[in-house]
Each structure stands twice: as structure tokens, then as C-alpha cells.
Amino acid sequence: MANTLLMPKATAVWLVDNTALSFDQIAHFCSLHPLEVKAIADGESAQGIKGMDPIMTGQLTRDEIARGEKDTSYRLRLSDPKVRVPESKRRGPRYTPVSKRQDRPNAILWLVRNHPELKDAQISRLVGTTKASIDQIRNRSHWNFSSLQPMDPVTLGFCSQIDLDIEVQRASQGKAAQAQPSGDTLLPASVTERLVPKVEASDKDDEEKELDANAVFAKLSALKGKPAEDEQE
């Protein structure tokens, strides 16, 4: 892997401010255009960018800079950095050795039986298989289903225990989210039944109070009417 300069523009800012290297030398070392280096020197570009010392990062030595300052035609050479940044691995289709491919159906069967909550996509990621193969084993239509034996995919080397635990946890969380009711729900019948009698009882009491009041007024009217009848007699 060829070494690459870290933060080339910040390095160019530092070289412009702290060395007597030419614009061409700095541009070549930092993979920039000479006019861009000139703009940095004139303050027209890279404003606000703090210069990064390539000597501190181990990408350039003082002797290399001194050699370049003495000879304007000299091209600076990048030193091996003190810190190496590992290359990011591209995730591609999982490769399974030929010797283990015959055990893939056994691993699928183990996952289907022991973790039925896993989706086909999750099983495919763990084992490196297709949805059609998973369906055949779920439906017991696989050509060799009678001879299959469920085997742990971790033991077979198809995936790690961490990968398996992560997928199982995701499936469990998704299942719990689906089971949990969302939104407003109706009150249970036991609650509504308790509320109705209370309302009816209060209404009934009000009606009884009205009846009692009418009876009292009727009695009073009857009592007032008796003395008048007695005087007429």
C-alpha cells in the first residue's frame, strides 16, 4: 500500500509559513496545483485552516526539507507515517469454502429451529445463503432434508457468536415492537359497566327528590284549603 499524505492542504499551509520551499515543491508534495499554493501564500485560499506539521506526524523529516530548500528542483519524498490508517474492508458476498458448503443446510436448519424469530434476510447474512434455500428448509422441500442435522453455525464457522447475538437481539426487538399496541384504545367493558350504574343512580336520586318536593307542596296546598272549607260551613 502506497503512503498517502494526511491533510494535504493543512500541510501545505504549514510548509508555506515555515519553510523556504518553492510553490512547485510544495504543490508536488501535497498533490496540489502551484497556483493553489500561491493563493495560500497570498491569503486568498485556505483561510481558517490551521497548518499541520508533517514533521510531527512523521511524514517528513527536517533533513528532507533542508535538502529541498537548497535545491529547488528536488522533489520531497514522503516518509513512512508513525500512524498507519488501516484500509476499510469492503463488504461483499460471504465466501464459504467448498468443504463447508455441504454443512450450510444444517446451519440453516439449526437457525430455523432454535431461532424462529429470525427473518430470512438475517439468516442469509449469517450463513451466506439464498432465500430460496431457506424456504426449502422451512417447507421441508429440500432434496436432502431427511438427512439434514441441525448444527450451530458458530461451531461450523459460518459466523461469530457476536454476529448471531446481534441478529437475535434485533429480531426480538422487532417482534416486541409489533406486539405492543399503538394509539388510543377503547376502555375495557369492566370500566364502562362501572360508570353507567353511577350515572343512572344519580339520575334516579334526582327524580326521587323532585317527586318528594311535589308531594310536600301538594300536602301544603291541601292543608291551606281545609280552613277555608271549614269557614264556609
Image (spheres, helix red, strand yellow):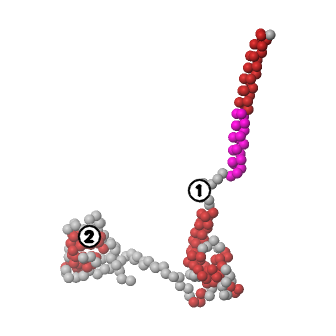
**Extreme bottom residue here?**
98
Q: Position of residue 164 (x, y in %)?
A: 59, 74
- Identified by mark 2, the residue type is Val
Which one is nearer the viewer's eye here, 180 or 71? Answer: 180
Task: Give the tally of numbered discs.
Answer: 2
Q: Which residue is disc 1 drawn over?
A: 183
At 23% from the left edge and 69% from the top edge, which residue is drawn?
Answer: 40
Q: Vertically, is 158 above or below 38?
A: below
Examine the image and state in which quarter residue 79 appears.
Answer: bottom left
* In this picture, residue 148 sits left or right of residue 27: right
Residue 187 x, y percent position in the rendering: 66, 51
Magenta segment, prevailing SS (helix, strand or loop): helix
Asked which quadrant contains residue 7, the reply is bottom left
* Residue 171 occupies quadrant: bottom right
Element carrying mark 1: loop
State the residue in front, 120 or 220.
220
Residue sitting at x 26%, y 65%: 47
Nearer-the-camera pick, 14 or 82: 14
Residue 156 horizontal/vertical position (percent):
61, 82
Q: Quadrant of the N terminus?
A: bottom left
Q: Which residues are magenta?
A: 188-207
Report if residue 197 lies within the magenta region: yes
Residue name at image x 53 percent, y 82 percent: 94
What residue is pinned by disc 2? Answer: 13
